[in-house]
Image: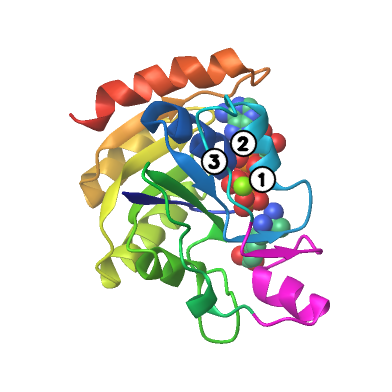
Amino acid sequence: MNYFVTAIDTDSGKTLVSTILCEALQADYWKPVQAGYPRDTEAVAKLLDPQRHVFFPEGYLLQTPASPHAAARIDGVTIDLQTLTPPATTRDLIIEGAGGCLVPLNDHDFVIDLAAHCHATVILVADLYLGSINHTLLTVEALRKRNLPVKGIIFNGPSNAESERIIMLHTGLPVLLRLPRQEQVTRQTIIDYAKELQQHWHA
Ligand SMILES: Nc1ncnc2c1ncn2[C@@H]1O[C@H](COP(=O)(O)OP(=O)(O)OP(=O)(O)O)[C@@H](O)[C@H]1O
Ligand SMILES: C[C@H](N)[C@H](N)CCCCCC(=O)O
Ligand SMILES: [Mg+2]
């Protein structure tokens, strides 16, 4: 099964959550479009057992840390959604987006279109900064408008009980995990939160 990890913004914790998902589901990992360095694929691979997962090469590895459509233009390439076919694997595949849902890949397609193109179920990462209620509800509206299946939300970083309550009330989505801010992210962090995620996965 393919899972597409998106978020309400860039730097919301998709890479960290993707690593936990790979551990929890014993899944492989693919970042179709990487804009700038360090590569998310390397960050994920560093925290997982290399014997148990495949870390597929990026579809587009762009040099500039910018919106993919702009980074691609700087590199003199155009991102073509049709070339971004998920790699074949017998395991589950965790596909990590770039930035949020409506980040442009080119003048026509958005990151959210990749989720549909990959026939993936979406996992939404939301942090709880002031402004995140609006960003989260808008993101869920955009996903629903496209009839994309959404497995649930993962809240990342400092908690905010009232924000969580109102987001759950309006979206009806299950919370798959709450991931507090870590002083240090180690292999043990990934193992611990993978176990917690497994408990909510089939609930
Ligand atoms: N819960 C957390 N505890 C500690 N550090 C975190 C946590 N969540 C995210 N970070 C750190 O914040 C930074 C941004 O997170 P991350 O790279 O996962 O974001 P992203 O959504 O994948 O961004 P991008 O759109 O660039 O892919 C990273 O340095 C990451 O290690
Ligand atoms: C470079 C960065 N870390 C992400 N990979 C891309 C974020 C694009 C955000 C575009 C936008 O919403 O303005
Ligand atoms: Mg990332």
First along the sequence among labels 2 and 3: 2
* Residue for badge 2: 44
Tell me if 194 is positioned left or right of 185 in this view: left
Circle 1 residues within 10 Å: few <14, some 14–19, many ≥20: many
Kind of residue at disc 2? Val
Total numbered labels: 3
Q: Is residue 93 magenta?
A: no
* Residue for badge 3: 54
Of 123 and 27, the residue lying toward us: 27
Position of the C terminus by quadrant:
top left
Can residue 161 be seen here? The reply is no
Tell me if 188 is positioned left or right of 200 in this view: right
Magenta part of the chain: 58-78
Residue at image location 43% in from the left, 55% down from the top: 88
First along the sequence among labels 1 and 3: 1
x, y percent for residue 92 = 37, 43
* Residue for badge 1: 40
Kind of residue at disc 3? Val
Q: Ligand 1: which quarter?
A: top right
**In front of the other: label 2 or label 3?**
3
x, y percent for residue 117 = 39, 70
Kind of residue at disc 1? Asp
Contact check, label 2 and label 3, Cβ < 8 Å? no
Callout 2 secondary element: helix
